[in-house]
């Protein structure tokens, strides 16, 4: 290899950069070079497009939801159905891109962090597809509340490691994945699942998710003959939001709205709303907004949604926030769960609890937009993984997890029925 | 000449390596931590790295991770680090602080540099701040005569070894193995090779860290490095039942090791 030039750091205004141990700099440079080459390589693009079409099922549909919109005060509402992708969320878009890059770089192993489990499942899936070894780090608390996804990852052949340190959630899983990476960087690619981390991750992950907004913009134009008035997405690390925002960023008439986890409410202190209480700082390799105390120690966060339960946010969102190019607001657990129930009942779609935050946001801003407007919501994932959480929330199961039913049919005497059955 | 330059010159004249001991401030609690750095200085540490406990120490293995959690639970506040630095200096060692970047950023880079200088600190080691991102800190350090100490790693290219060491003052932290902090059974050949590569681009003293836990390992590293950094092993000793006594005993052994005894 010839001498590489001094590291270039990519920033979004004041945010981004590379706040990492020196040991990782060479790997980040290698990754940056590989992804730049790959994106300019027609063969790589063709392979990624083929997988997105034949494996993921892209383009994902755009669904108008009039019965849901009837509760939103006027606008027509369209859902970008990332929930219908293979593995059940938008996460697969980025994962396939990075997994192909890992193969291209000659790495035989991928590692990932996961919160709700969606990114872990997508990574385990791609690893199985491409014959890569896979280890997924998941906070201990999250392994308990997303047990089904732990089983899914293991069925797919991934090793799942529970992380008990710190708050036992997504941030601690990222710490542990970083520790693994710095130790095994020679043969391992860290398949980071969101638009944060050191450069080039925020840019690269955004570029792999930009397909969401590109498709939605065209699909919506086919139906309504124009742009939406607003785009709504939930924001944890912020990958699904950046993915749908990117195609509309240069359109001043389109309001971009990110909805963060408001947990028990901002005033309770139990939330994960970085733009309602966080300050600029550094976490996990990026300069961005961080929920932190006066000494710069990271605060513990809370959300009913494991995927949004994270104390910092992708640096590009910090830039969009400070520059006023996008607006952000918190949605409480209660509001998100009400929107979750409403979409189930009015449209027959069970959303991920993460995505339910975007739906709640749409219900909130709908009346301001009013009649004759068009609202696009990124339905980033499906709610299969959340059925247990939702069942407990709405009292559909008892404390032991046993189902409660609405009623019992007829006076049952099984033996008598059997004697009178058709085979008797 | 800074106090760091003095200590490495003196060790060189004595024909030995410097012993650089790491302890987290406020571990297991602040009073014990103050006593621990005094013990470390008395028992032969030339330079003391005072660590800042942090909630997300992604370069640290389980021993230091747990120590940071313990210190935070015991009520560690960032300003306490200056009290520990003062104690180390008053006990005769040269104190430097080792910290992840966010606490400094939150405290204010200039204010931190000023308070560190006032407490008698000689420099700052920043495991997650590379020179590329350190513009503000390097100016603040230069203004107050503090040494910015950056890390080099086995994966560093020759170009990065050159640019990183050019940004260092006092000494260079040579992270000898790819991985997190922690005790290792053997120090590995990567260390010596990385020291050689680094020597080729700088005249600064080179201190080797990550993995040293015994007097014998210290002697082995002292054969090719200007300083031997010991962290996890000291923290583990301090965390035991007879912490301060075990710390003193281990430090004596390490001090003999760097003298090739």
Image (cartoon, coloured by chain):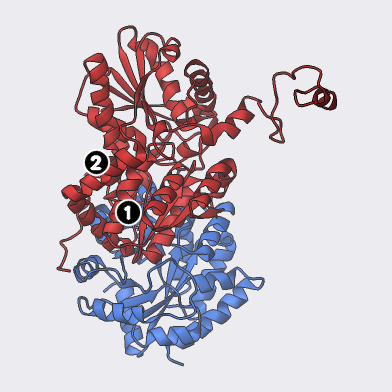
Is residue A35 visible in the rendered image? The answer is yes
Chain of the residue under the numbered disc 1 shown in the image? A
Residue that label 2 marks:
A12
What's the mark number on residue A244?
Answer: none
Both labels 1 and 2 in a single chain = yes
Judging from the image, what secondary structure is the residue with disc 2 in?
A: strand
Decide: is B245 above or below B60.
below
Residue A3 x, y percent position in the rendering:
15, 67
Q: Residues within 10 Å of mark 1 (few under 14, many from 20)?
A: many
Is A357 in front, or is A97?
Answer: A97
| Front one among A121 and B11 | A121
Dot 2: few (<14), some (14–19), or many (≥20) neighbours within 10 Å? some
Residue shown at 56%/70% (left/top)?
B236
Query: Which residue is disc 1 drawn over?
Result: A19
Name the quadrant of the C terminus of chain A: top right
Residue B6 coordinates in the image, percent (x, y)? 31, 78
Label the red chain with its letter: A
| Residue at the spot 23% in from the left edge and 52% down from the top edge | A35
When the figure is inspected, residue A150 is found, relative to residue B11, above or below; the finding is above
The secondary element bearing badge 1 is classed as loop
Q: Which circle's residue, 1 or 2, is located before the other in the chain?
A: 2
**Can residue B38 be seen from the camera position used here?**
no
The residue at the point 42 percent across, 17 percent down is A364
Q: Chain of mark 2?
A: A
* Quadrant containing the N terminus of chain A in the rendered view: bottom left
């Amino acid at each position: 290899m010839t001498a590489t030039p001094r590291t270039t750091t990519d920033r979004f205004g004041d945010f981004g950069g590379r706040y990492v141990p020196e040991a990782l700099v060479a790997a980040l440079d290698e990754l940056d070079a590989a992804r730049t080459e790959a994106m300019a390589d027609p063969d790589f693009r063709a392979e990624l497009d083929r997988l997105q079409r034949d494996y993921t099922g892209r383009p994902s549909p755009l669904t108008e939801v009039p019965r849901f919109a009837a509760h939103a005060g006027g606008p027509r509402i369209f859902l970008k159905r990332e929930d219908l992708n293979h593995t059940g969320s938008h996460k697969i878009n980025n994962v396939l891109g990075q997994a192909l890059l890992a193969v291209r770089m000659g790495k035989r192993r991928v590692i990932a962090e996961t919160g709700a489990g969606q990114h872990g499942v997508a990574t385990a899936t791609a690893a199985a597809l491409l014959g890569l070894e896979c280890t997924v780090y998941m906070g201990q608390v999250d392994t308990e509340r997303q047990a089904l996804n732990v089983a899914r990852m293991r069925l797919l052949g991934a090793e799942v490691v529970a992380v008990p340190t710190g708050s036992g959630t997504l941030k601690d899983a990222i710490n542990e994945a970083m520790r693994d990476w710095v130790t095994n960087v020679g043969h391992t690619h860290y398949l980071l699942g969101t638009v944060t981390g050191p450069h080039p991750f925020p840019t690269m992950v955004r570029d792999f998710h930009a397909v969401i907004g590109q498709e939605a913009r065209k699909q919506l134009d086919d139906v309504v003959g124009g742009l939406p008035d607003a785009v709504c997405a939930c924001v944890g690390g912020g990958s699904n939001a950046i993915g749908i925002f990117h195609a509309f960023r240069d359109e001043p008439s389109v309001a971009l709205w990110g909805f963060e986890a408001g947990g028990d409410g901002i005033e309770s202190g139990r939330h994960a709303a970085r733009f309602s209480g966080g300050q600029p700082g550094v976490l996990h390799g990026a300069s961005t907004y961080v929920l932190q105390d006066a000494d710069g120690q990271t605060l513990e966060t809370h959300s009913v949604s494991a995927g949004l339960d994270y104390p910092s946010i992708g640096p590009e969102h910090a830039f969009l926030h400070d520059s006023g190019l996008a607006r952000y607001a918190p949605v409480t657990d209660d509001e998100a769960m009400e929107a979750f129930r409403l979409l189930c009942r009015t449209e027959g779609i069970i959303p991920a609890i993460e995505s339910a935050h975007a739906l709640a946001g749409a219900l909130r801003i709908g009346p301001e937009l009013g009649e004759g407007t068009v609202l696009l919501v990124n339905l980033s994932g499906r709610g299969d993984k959340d059925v247990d959480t939702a069942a407990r929330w709405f009292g559909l199961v008892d404390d032991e997890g046993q189902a409660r039913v609405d009623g019992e049919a007829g006076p049952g005497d099984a033996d008598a029925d059997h004697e009178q059955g058709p085979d008797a | 000449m800074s106090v760091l330059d003095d200590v490495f010159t003196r060790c060189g004249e004595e024909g030995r390596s410097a012993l650089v001991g790491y302890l987290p401030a406020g571990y297991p609690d602040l009073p014990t931590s103050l006593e621990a750095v005094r013990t470390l200085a008395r028992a032969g540490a030339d330079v003391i790295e005072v660590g800042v406990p942090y909630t997300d120490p992604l370069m640290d293995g389980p021993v230091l991770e747990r120590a940071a959690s313990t210190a935070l639970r015991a009520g560690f506040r960032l300003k306490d680090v200056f009290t520990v630095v003062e104690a180390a200096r008053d006990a005769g060692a040269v104190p430097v602080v080792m910290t992840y970047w966010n606490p400094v950023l939150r405290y204010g880079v200039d204010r931190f540099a000023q308070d560190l200088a006032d407490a008698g600190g000689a420099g700052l080691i920043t495991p997650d701040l590379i020179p590329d991102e350190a513009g503000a800190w390097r100016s603040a350090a230069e203004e107050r005569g503090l040494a910015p100490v950056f890390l080099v790693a086995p994966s560093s290219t020759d170009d990065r070894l050159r640019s990183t060491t050019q940004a260092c003052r006092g000494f260079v932290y040579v992270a000898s193995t790819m991985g997190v902090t922690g005790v290792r059974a053997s120090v590995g050949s990567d260390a010596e090779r990385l020291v050689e590569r680094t020597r080729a681009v700088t005249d600064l003293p080179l201190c080797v860290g990550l993995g040293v836990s015994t007097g014998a390992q210290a002697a082995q590293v002292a054969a090719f490095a200007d300083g031997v950094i010991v962290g996890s092993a000291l923290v583990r000793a301090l965390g035991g039942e007879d912490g301060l006594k075990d710390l003193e005993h281990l430090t004596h052994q390490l001090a003999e090791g760097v003298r090739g005894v």
